[in-house]
Image (spheres, rainbow, N blue to C red):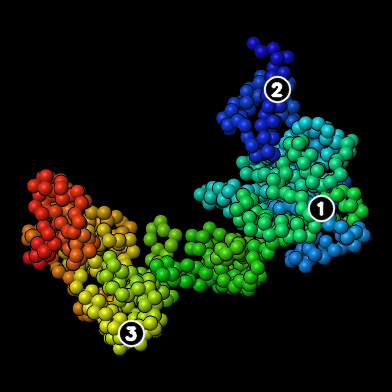
Amino acid sequence: MTSSRTAERRIYALRDQINHHNYLYYVMDAPEIPDSEYDKLMRELEELEHKYPELVTRDSPTQRIGATPLAEFGEVRHEVPMLSLDNAFDEDEVLDFDRRVHERLGTNAQLDYTAEPKLDGLAISLVYEDGVLVRGATRGDGTMGEDVTQNIRTIASVPLRLLGNGFPALLETRGEIFMPKKGFEKLNAQAESRHEKIFINPRNAAAGSLRQLDARITASRPLEFFAYAWGQVRGGSLPARHSEVLERFRDWGLRTNPENRLVVGLEGCLQFYKQMASKRNRLPYQIDGVVYKVDRLDLQRELGYVARAPRWALAHKFPAEEAMTLLLAVEFQVGRTGALTPVARLQPVFVGGANISNATLHNMDEIERKDVHIGDTVIVRRAGDVIPEVVGVVLAKRPKNAQRVRLPCYCPECGSKVLRLDGEAVVRCSGGLYCPAQRKELIRHFASRRALNIEGLGEKLVEQLVDTGLVHTPADLFSLSVAQLAGLERMGDKSAQNLVNSIDHARNTTLARFLYALGIRDVGETTAGVLARHFGTLEALMAADETALMQVADVGPVVAASIAAFFKEPHNRQVISALRTAGVRWPEHSVAQQVSLGPLCGKIFVLTGALVHMTRDDAKASIQALGGKVSTSVSKKTDYVVVGEEPGTKLVEAQKLGIAQLDERAFERLLKQ
Ligand code: I6G
């Protein structure tokens, strides 16, 4: 049995080890043992303390989470007021600051500054007495703050006991409590899955987490700490420079920002600002600027304070990425794929370095999740080049007449019905072939190689045809004249004639290609082929309801719903009818014909080598249209190997197995039978 003395020694040793590993992990960012080893040490300490409760101390690493929730936070007076910083919003203001500092100090010499990222969190004061954390308090109004000791103790990067020695008997360190971006996203994802309120940004999440009366809730939140300043210091002294104090803090186990730098003069400050601005999005936490501090503490004392801010420090802010403004209306924009995106029309506001009056609301789910109403005061965010977005609502400012956002029933571009499939956040226009918003994308797809394969009709030309109003739907392509085309930019008579010829050529196609060309949502090339084989005719497919569609191999409820919705939309039926009138055709086979007749029905083909008169895709589609199957490897089941130029090893295998070979001519004859 462990004697009490042995247990005591082991407990102290374990605490030292755990504190040391905390230091390596949080302060040095260089852990030496895996988490599992660390957990083992913690478990051993917990067990020993459980057995010897009289040996438990407040600064033991096991004592982070207090058991009883508070009724309210106590008040704390800051003996040394917690000041704020003057802000600079451009280089000129930094220049003025540096000039004022020089004037007051009566020197022309370049000064050393500590340059630090300014975290977007909450200022905090931590008091250590004889190295033991005794109090954590918020800034409050700078003189009176709230006692959040219980909550601060739960933050793993805040040491409960300082390491090493040489620290003053009373040390009040100050710094920032913040929530890293990843932790914030995870917290919001959890809140969302539980249908709880989400936080607007990491700063709000950190503030909300620290103001919990139940420390167990704070303990579950991913909060972190960086030290950057100090208040009361008694029974000891600090070094003579700010940068040296920060180093000392680290030695004592207080985490400081590894991005901090000692820089020289104004130039050094501005260079640091630029570096941090470009690094900003890659940092694991949000920053809203950088802070410059005259490094020598004697010079700081000489400079003193003005009003509530030190003359020796300056916050150089990045352009604000978030701002509040009024949501005037919500409009729906139709994208190239038919997705309707709600767009917030805002009272113009300056944010992220630009005036913005529109921001995305993403989709209806997001609107519901954020509880956005028209008339609300909203928070918009514009970070870097990212599209501005509405991140949240200031509910306290909601006017009585605020209105819910309603999803339109019809597409604002073309009037076709709007669809929201079960389980999908995105809402779509069902007027695929007809909708102007989808026109360019659809025509480009319609003409693409694997669809109707209209040679020479590239993206640029599609743009011109649509922009000049010559083409509204794919059917219009078939009535284009040489004269019309020749009038377009970079289009000579010859190219115009060539394009008319290839459009004419594209009239003869297969049902599978035609279906694929229609750009029905969820209907790719393979599904189009399967549908063509299953139904045999376009009429049969168009007449099929969702139940009938689901009989087709590979067609599930989502795809069936997309197909049914597409053919239900009268605008789409009109365009299909116009295409057929324009002469778009394909060999028709009823299902019965396919099964009983058709030379290729049930036959398995393998293609090898390059065909001269058709692409491999065309050959494949033709075989499938006539009921045949195409396999990628030769086996005893193969009926024909189609042999093009420079065939591969498949030919050798076919010869070995004695399988019938078709050259391109024989293959073409077979297709025409
Ligand atoms: O609000 C602050 C943010 C960052 C600060 C600060 C800081 O240093 C990186 N430093 C001081 C001295 C003060 N406020 C008062």
Query: Where is residue 68 shown, x and y percent of the image?
Result: 69, 36
Kind of residue sitting beneath label 3: Gly
Cα–Cα span, label 3 and label 1: 68 Å
Q: Cβ–Cβ below 8 Å for labels 3 and 2? A: no
Is the C-beta of the residue carrying label 2 under 8 Å from the nearest atom of ligand 1? no
252 with respect to 298 (left or right) = left
- Which picture quadrant has residue 616? bottom left
- Which picture quadrant has residue 7? top right
The residue carrying mark 3 is: 492
Query: Element type at marker 3?
Result: loop
Is 236 drawn above or below residue 2 in the view shown? below
For the point 67% across and 56% down, the residue is 276
Cα–Cα span, label 2 and label 1: 42 Å
Query: Where is residue 612 shown, x and y percent of the image?
Result: 19, 65
Other residues around mark 1 within 10 Å, as few (<14) / some (14–19) / many (≥20): many
The residue carrying mark 1 is: 112
Label of residue 13 in the image: 2
Kind of residue sitting beneath label 2: Ala
